[in-house]
Amino acid sequence: MWEKKMGRNRGEKEETEKYIGLLKLVQILSFLVVFVAGIIIGLATSSHMNQYFTPSLLLSTNHFSGLSFESNNCSKNCEENAYLHFEKFFHPENLRHRMSDEQLFWRASMVPSKEEYPVVRTPKLAFMFLTRGPLPLLPLWERFFKGHEEYFSIYVHALPGYKLNVSKDSPFYGRQIPSQNVAWGTVEMADAEKRLLANALLDFSNERFILLSESCIPVFNFPTVYKYLSGSEHSFVESYDDPSRYGRGRYNRRMRPDIKVYQWRKGSQWFEMHRKVAIYIISDTKYLTIFRKYCRPSCYPDEHYIPTYLNIFHPSLMANRTVTWVNWSVLGPHPAMYRKENITEDFIQSIRNSNGTLCLYNEERTSKCYLFARKFAPDALEPLLNMSSKVMEF
């Protein structure tokens, strides 16, 4: 009886152990099935997501129209992708781009929150030439710039389609910016000025910005100009209230309430300004739009837009004078033009000495008021070159 009972218990134990073993096997198989299914689902999901988040799509020109990005492997194309290089971002050498004005102004208006620069920065002067085409006085400017390449940048805005013909060793080589048509006396002049400023602002080395024409000349050497502008506490923008029909007479009452008549100002188109002021100018859309609507005809936005805008918002930043001499004593819409027969040493010296008048520089009186002069005809080049070393000291 006892032996039968022991045999029955042993059989039940064996059956229980078999059941437990099968249960563990089922658990293991279930875990494997779930694990494999997870891998398959993960791979499928990853493949699906890659369709939306591949680098080629993220950097596609369809998403950033007007900007040219490359999506190839960096190891092959880093030299071509300027936006990947800090040096080329900080100091772009190639001025060609496909940005619209709106994109350009947005890009140029970026200001780092961090004050310190991550590289050794040499402040530069940006010389911006607004011209229809040729620069007939270019040899004089080349002599002026020679030997000071680390301290200046050049930007040329000419009519679309015009190509400046200079040798590769000229500081003007490759310095034309993408341009648009400009009609004299229209708001297009202000557009061109902002376009020059914005392109120059892309180079973080540029600290001061000088607007010049093809008929401008320097009357001092480069070291003098650099020291004068770099040491100034103000931007040389002329802004004054002219009660005549050539000043307030051009004001349009439809500019109210944003621009009131007592805020209306006039000044020379040929300005010089600090980087901070240049950023203020290219960041404005509202006030230039007002000028575009109401400053026409015979209003000349280039004489009123910047002087008025800065008078309203940043009057303390201006010296309220220009550093470009010009003779408006002649009657008519244009200043006097000086030709070969007018160029003498005494004439240039009189400009350098401000004709005996004084001006303020950092709140102190000085006779050195003008660094540049205009308008000079192409045939004035030869006598200017002949006296540049003796009179202008370059």
Image: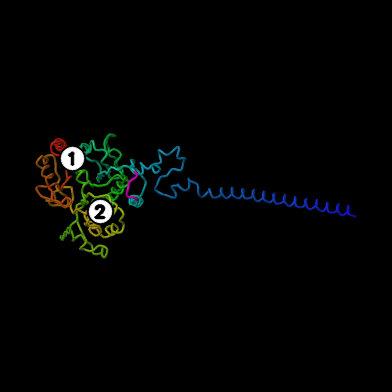
Q: CA distance from mark 1 to mark 2?
A: 34 Å
Tell me the residue that label 2 is attached to. Answer: 186
Which image quarter is the N terminus in? bottom right
What are the residue bounds of the magenta stretch?
114-118
36 relative to 249, above or below: above
Question: In the structure shown, which secondary structural element does the residue marked by tag 1 occupy?
Answer: loop
Q: Is residue 123 left or right of residue 217?
A: right
Mark 1, other Cα within 10 Å: few <14 / some 14–19 / many ≥20: some
Tell whether position 46 is magenta.
no
Residue type at mark 1: give it. Asn
Residue depicted at x 83% and y 51%: 10
Q: Which of the labelled discs sits on residue 123, or is there none?
A: none
141 relative to 186, above or below: above
Q: Position of residue 112 (x, y in %)?
A: 34, 50
Q: Is residue 370 left or right of residue 124?
A: left
- Specify whether residue 101 is in view: no
203 or 293: nearer the viewer: 203
Tell me the residue that label 1 is attached to. Answer: 221
Question: In the structure shown, which secondary structural element does the residue marked by tag 2 occupy?
Answer: loop
Q: Magenta part mainly helix, strand or loop?
A: loop
